[in-house]
Image (cartoon, rainbow, N blue to C red):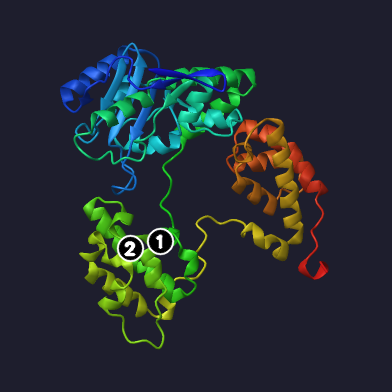
Amino acid sequence: TVAEQVSGREVVDLTEPRDGLPPVITAPGDLAEAVRRLAAGTGPVAVDAERASGYRYGQRAYLVQLRREGAGTMLIDPIACPDLSGVDAALTGVEAVLHAAPQDLPCLAEVGYRPRLVFDTELAGRLLGYPRVALGTLLEEILGYRLAKEHSAADWSVRPLSAEMLRYAALDVEVLTDLRDALAEQLAEQGKTEWARQEFAAEAAAPPPPPRADPWRRTSGIHRVRTRRGLAVVRELWNVRDEIARDADLSPRRILADQAIIEAARLPVTGQPPLTRPQLDKIGGFRARNARRHAARWLAAVLRARELGDDELPEVTGPATIPGPPPAHRWAERDPAAAARLAAAREAVTAVAEAHRLPTENLLAPDTVRRITWEPPQPATPEAVAAALAGYGARPWQVELTAGPLAAAFRAAKPLPGPDETG
């Protein structure tokens, strides 16, 4: 390790695992031995998973790291060992310490490991009011360890993994439990232990997110496409790209860039001859190596979109995935009283959050604030507001802190002046 003085305190660079670099577990026998050691260990288990976002299709895990007192560090290759149900059984009832747990829990569940007890060090940092909660930042600020992050965006699907990548992966769980203990102590000092327990339980129990409605609408730059015909081009190209990417197990954007899709959608349609491949090839993204081999499919997708009837074209504004209030920026025009309530509610939530050194979004989800403000209970008593908040999924500690202030804000809010009243 290398130590230096930073801002008057010693910071130690973590460069080598304390027990040396463990071998990657790829054989059933070695996995069985790892399970035995994990079961014999004590205390929480530090957990991390490495994916290949930006390289491969989906969010599967390509390396799983575990470290437990008395068991040491294990690096498991879930491609060679795709069933970690034995790990799950060995760690039943054992708290799993993760950083940004919602990112890793889905891919861990895919291989059979589903922690029931979770401690999320990122979420703990948020609840404690830390302005920056990246793992490296918290380790340095709280424990005085500097963690290199040069492989955080690496392609973890490559085989074999380099010694440098494996060292990085092992160090990710090296002191995670130490960080957990320090954060737990601070949570207790601030009276937030129960808050954290409820938040961690919600993370562990959260179901997989439902499929997005119209996922193609998340294409970067889609706001530049202002016609239904153009949106149909985006939709057709996105769907073809997704099919190709899934079959090739590649990130869709490595097949065809979002920018190319948007540029194709903005090509003139009316008054022009039918689109040709040379016209499409003028857009740089379609000349890239991975895109060029599918040129016929891109052209067919665009032509298909151009030939759709008006009743088959997507709307400029997509359907809401969940029924709810309109966008907040339209409230003042549609319902000035609701806009006034929203302003008062946001002010009340911000005041409570600041008083408890919390980000407002962790005190109460912005969507929950919008929903209860758009249709508040009548009358808006603290008890009625509390019941409504619980119905929207707010945890008991959040309800306790915000129901009263929100009820008061609703009672005091006065409608904002309409457009014809502002001079």
The picture places residue 260, in percent across and down from the top left corner, at 36, 65
* Three-letter amino acid code of the residue under disc 1: Trp
Image-based side of 94 in relation to 322, left or right: left
**Where is mark 1, residue-wise?**
216
- Name the residue located 18 percent from the left edge and 28 percent from the top edge: 26
Give the camera-side residue of 190 and 253: 253
Residue 45 in view (yes/no):
yes
* Vertical position of residue 111 compared to residue 224: above or below: above
Residue 293 occupies quadrant: bottom left
The reply to whether residue 201 is in sight is no
Mark 2 secondary-structure assignment? helix
Residue 354 pos. (x, y %): 70, 35
Q: Is residue 77 left or right of residue 214?
A: left
Q: Is residue 69 above or below residue 373?
A: above
Q: Which residue is mark 2?
A: 239
Q: Residue at x 48, y 75 (%)?
A: 227
401, above or below 35, in the image: below
Q: Residue at x 21, y 25 (%)?
A: 25
State the count of labels: 2
Q: Position of residue 308 (x, y in %)?
A: 37, 78
Q: Quadrant of the N terminus?
A: top left
